[in-house]
């Protein structure tokens, strides 16, 4: 079963990273742009702002977000499996999660003006 990845295609950084992933691993993922997508909200049970705030995936029927979502993506990409092995270590994950949440919040604040209120 493919992992559904919900990403913000209107954010330059998000789009660049996801486009890179799309080029190197096409078969394990379904890439879903959350920009103006009510379907994404229905599938994830998340609000538009929640979807914009961080990366989300659906894996084995479970909605997972943030740094943990990246771990699952990397685990399923042969080229990035080493990142999964490093960042899943508890103390490394702790700092990765803090960095991710801070950076994602900055991107959310920077890009939220692009979206109409929902």
Image (tube, rainbow, N blue to C red):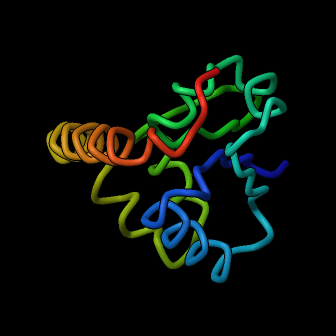
Front position in the image: 71 or 90: 71
Residue 41 to residue 23: above or below? above
Between 58 and 86, the one nearer to me in the picture = 58
| Residue 18 point in image, percent of width and height | 57, 66
Q: Find residue 26 and report its image quarter.
A: bottom right
Q: Tell me if residue 58 comes above or below residue 10 in the rendering.
A: above
Q: Residue at position x 33%, y 39% from top?
A: 109
Q: Nearer the viewer, residue 26 or 51?
A: 51
The image shows residue 90 at horizontal and vertical percentages of 22, 38
Residue found at x 28% / y 37%:
101
Answer with left or right where residue 82 lies relative to residue 6.
Answer: left
**Where 65 sits versus 45, above or below?**
below
Q: In which quarter of the image is residue 113?
A: top left
The number of discs equals 0
The quarter of the picture where the C terminus appears is top right
Residue 103 visible somewhere in the drawing: yes
Rendering coords of residue 81 (x, y %): 46, 67
> On the picture, is 29 further left or further right than 51?
right
Q: Residue at x 74, y 57 (%)?
A: 31
Residue 89 visible at all? no
Residue 2 rendering spot, x and y as whole percentages: 80, 52
Is 6 displayed left or right of 40 in the figure?
A: left
Which residue is at a point 57% across and 39% down the rendered structure image? 115
């Amino acid at each position: 079963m493919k992992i559904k990845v919900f990403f913000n295609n209107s954010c330059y950084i998000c789009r660049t990273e996801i486009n890179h992933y799309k080029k190197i691993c096409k078969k394990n993922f379904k890439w879903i742009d959350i920009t103006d997508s009510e379907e994404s909200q229905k599938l994830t049970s998340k609000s538009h702002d929640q979807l914009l705030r961080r990366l989300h995936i659906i894996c084995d029927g479970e909605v997972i977000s943030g740094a943990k979502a990246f771990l699952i993506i990397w685990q399923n990409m042969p080229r990035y499996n080493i990142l999964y092995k490093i960042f899943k270590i508890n103390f490394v994950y702790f700092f990765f999660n803090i960095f991710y949440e801070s950076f994602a919040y900055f991107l959310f604040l920077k890009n939220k003006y692009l979206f109409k209120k929902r």
